[in-house]
Amino acid sequence: MSMERNVALIALFTALIAALGLIPQLTLAFGVPITAQSLGVMLCGTVLGAKRGGYAALLFVGLVAIGLPLLAGGRGGLGLFTAPTAGFLIGFPVAAFVTGLVMERLRGLPVGWAAGIASVFGGVVALYIFGIAGLAIVLDRSAIEAALLVTAFIPGDLIKAVFAGLITAALFRARPHSVLSRS
Amino acid sequence: MISLTSPVKTCAHDWPAGGKLLALCVASLALFAARDLWVQVGAAFGVLLLYTLPGQVFLWHGMQRLWPLWPFVAVLVAWHVATGVPHEGALIALRMLSAVGLANLVTMTTKLGDMMAVVNWLLRPFARFGINLRAIELAAAMVIRFTPVLAQKGSALALAWRARSAKRAGWRVIVPFMVLALDDADRVAEALRARGGFEVDKN
């Protein structure tokens, strides 16, 4: 694939993660407390694959760090990297990468199932490892105590993984050549 | 797109961005190393003083950025009062507020362009290992341009949904939204190639 297409896809997906956090109408069902932003990170992995998806999420984190208000609620800047939730932000690229990696390994499964399972490994397991580590460090708690603080958010993120699977499957029907993790 | 730089211009705006970032790293490490409550109280007052120096508007904007931390402060205080070590809770809460406050100060007093110049300088040694700096700069510029465009397209899709359905636009609207983004990416890639693309850099 051409360098131009790579860069354009990575930039557009970075913008997609940001846009998903900025559109208030796109809050998810069942009163999921957080926005669709981490859904965007999962989709980076399931659609673009490990490497490109990881780059897109890394670019997102980098732009937040230099002061662009791309996080949900118009937040951004260096303060987020010393805040208790820093681990979740720093974990975004890893989450996208792991999601893509699992997605690429599950070629035998239908796209929707593979994307859903990959999103659980990347967007939930990998992301929460980073997030809980960040909470434990900043709040000076043990990993188990830090994990207790965020358990309330895990069901919401599991629902997002299901959505990531459904969306990726629908996208694969609409634009099969654009789901790069399968081409 | 709006940036998070302070509306009030301070003398810190003219200091070199690299120096501010280095100072922030050192100060953050020092904050996390200091285990004495009074050191943390002093540091917190120091940070508060830095916020008050440029005036009321600056202080107000700065405090607004720190406000989202209140649930963590509440959890820390509740936890440590319950376990009988309130001074430890105060230490951790103050340390967190100072660390976030300082980092936020750097963001508020550094222009986006200056910050990008530092990133560029940091990445330059990696260029010889095959990192294409121009591609990164272009991608960053594209994100800044496309985020509002995509947000607008997404809002339009959500509104179109609401015009036809009594229910809220849920996750289903994200599929056409992503199709739009993917098609945009294809067109942008073609436009880049038509203008010489990244081949130009090889000469």
Image (spheres, rainbow, N blue to C red):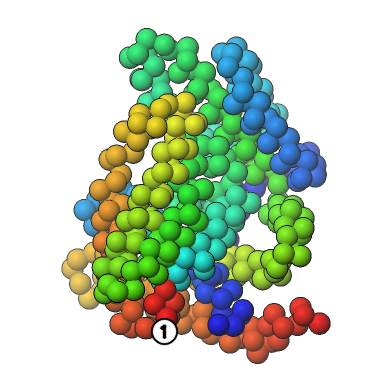
What residue lies at 37% left-to-right and 9% top-to-bottom?
A: B84
What residue lies at 37% left-to-right and 68% top-to-bottom?
A: A105
The image shows residue A72, relative to residue A148, as above or below, that is below
> In screen coordinates, is B100 left or right of A42?
right
In this orientation, which residue lies closer to the viewer: A138 or B6?
Answer: A138
Residue B161 appearing in the image: no
Q: Which residue is mark 1?
A: A177
> In screen coordinates, is A164 left or right of B111?
left
Quadrant placement of the N terminus of chain A: bottom right
Q: Residues within 10 Å of mark 1 (few under 14, many from 20)?
A: few
Chain for numbered disc 1: A
Q: Residue A69 in the image: x percent, y percent? A: 54, 53
What residue lies at 22% left-to-right and 76% top-to-bottom?
A: B164
The image shows residue B70, relative to residue A43, as above or below, that is above
**Residue closest to the far left:** B166
In this orientation, which residue lies closer to the viewer: B144 or A115?
Answer: A115
What residue lies at 48% left-to-right and 43% top-to-bottom?
A: A87
